[in-house]
Amino acid sequence: MHIAWLGKKSPFCGNVTYGREITNALLDRDYRVSFLHFSQPQNSYEHLQYEENNHNSANCHEVSLPFIYKSQVYTIPSLKSSKVLLRSLRQLKPDLVHASLTLSPLDFVLPDICEELNLPLVATFHPPFDSKIRNLKSSTQYLTYQLYAPCLARYDRVIVFSEIQRDLLIKLGVPGERVVIIPNGVDQHKYSPGYSSLKYQLRTKKLFVYQGRIAPEKNIEALLKAWKLADMGENCLLLMVGDGPTRSSLQPHYGKEHNIVWLGYISDEHQRINILRGADVFILPSLVEGLSISLLEAMSCGVACLATDAGADGEVLDNGAGIVLDTQGVATQLKTLLPLFRNHPEMISLLGNKARQRVLERYTLHQNITKLEQLYSEVANRQLINY
C-alpha cells in the first residue's frame, strides 16, 4: 500500500517525532510512503520536488510544500500550497492520505482535495487539552477543537489519543464511527533501560530531568520554583533538555547555583536516550497535553515519572505506573514530592519498573502500527466498495 503522509519535519516538536516514527515503522513493514511537508524546495515551486529519505529511501520520497511561516505550533502555507498538494497527489496516486494535522489552513481544504481525487483520508488530531472538560471549555484549546470539528467530520477517520478527546469531538459534531483511539507508541527496544555514565559526568547522585519544549503551556516555571523551594541539596541535579520561547526569561533566574543545568535542544536521538537512561526521575508539569511522546520515552527507559493529568498523560500513569499531579497548584505538589524521591530510592526503582511495564502492555510502537494498518485496510476497502 502507498501512503501519502502529510506532516511536519521541522521545527522539532511532538508532531515531528510522531511522523518520523510512524513513517519509518511503515517502511519497515514494506509500505511505500510519500512524505509531504512544508519546506523550501531547491528549485521552483512549479515542479514536484522529491528528496530521498535516509530511512529505506527506495520506498520513500519527500515532497516540498511552499509556506510563508511555520513554528512548533502552527503553519501558514503560501497561496500556491493547495495547488502544489493537489498536483502532487494526482501524480503520486497513493492508496490513502494520512494527515498528521499541522494546525494549518491547508487542513481545511484537504477533504476537498481528496474528494476530488477520490482518495481516502485519515487524520491524526494532535492539539493538546486539559483532561478536565470544565477547564478545557474555558481555554484556547477548546476553541481549536470547535474550529476543527466541522472539518474533521469530513475526514474518513480521525485518530485521537484518549476517550476524553473522542467524546469531545463527538459532542462537537464529528460522527462517532469516524473517531478512533490509537495512542502514541514508542520503540521499546530502542528506548530501553541501560547503562549511562551521565550522572558520573555531571557529578551528581540523583538526576531529575525535564525534556520537551520550554513554552508557557508546559508550565516550566512551576517546576523550577518547586525545585528551588525544595532545596534539594548538592547531590541532586535538575536537567532541562529542550528549547522554546520562555527559556530566555527563565534560565537567568534558575541556574547552576540552584543545581539546574540547561542543555537546550538535543537533536541526536542516541544522546537523548542516554540522558533518559541516566535519569532517576522524569517530570512533566504541563497545563495541557495530547499524549506526550517524551513521557512514553522516559517510561520505556525505566524512569520514574511524575506528570500532570493533562491530555492523556494521567491515563498513561494511572493505577501506579507513575505519580499523577493535578494541573492546578503544580509547584506546591512538586515541592512536597521532590524530597520524597530524593530520600527514597526504592520508590524510584519501583515506579521505574512499573513505568516500563506499562509501556510494554499498552504503548509500544508495534501495537500502534498494527492498529494503524487495520485502520488503513478498513478505510481503503470501504472506499473501493463505495467507488
Image (cartoon, rainbow, N blue to C red):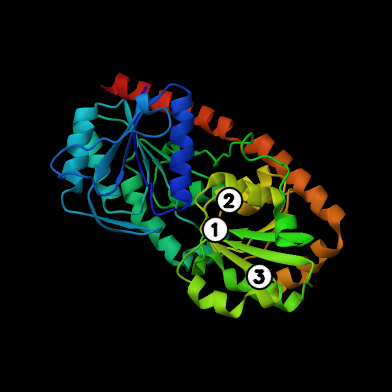
Q: Quadrant of residue 219?
A: bottom right
Front-most of 138 and 318? 318
Answer whether labels 2 and 3 touch (C-beta < 8 Å): no
Q: Residue furthest front?
A: 201
Q: Are marks 1 and 2 in contact (CB under 8 Å)?
A: yes
The residue that label 2 is drawn on is 294
Work out whether residue 89 or residue 320 is closer to the camera in this orientation and state it: 89
Q: Amino acid at mark 3?
A: Ile
At horizontal 49% and vertical 38% (from top left) the residue drawn is 21
Q: Is residue 58 above or below residue 8?
A: above
Tag 1: amino acid: Gly
- Residue that badge 1 annotates: 212
Q: State whether residue 39 is above or below residue 135.
A: above
Residue tagged by mark 3?
A: 260
The picture places residue 325, in percent across and down from the top left corner, at 68, 62
Task: Please state which amino acid type lies under the numbered disc 2.
Answer: Ser
Image quadrant where residue 63 sits: top left
Of badges 3 and 1, the one in the foreground is: 3
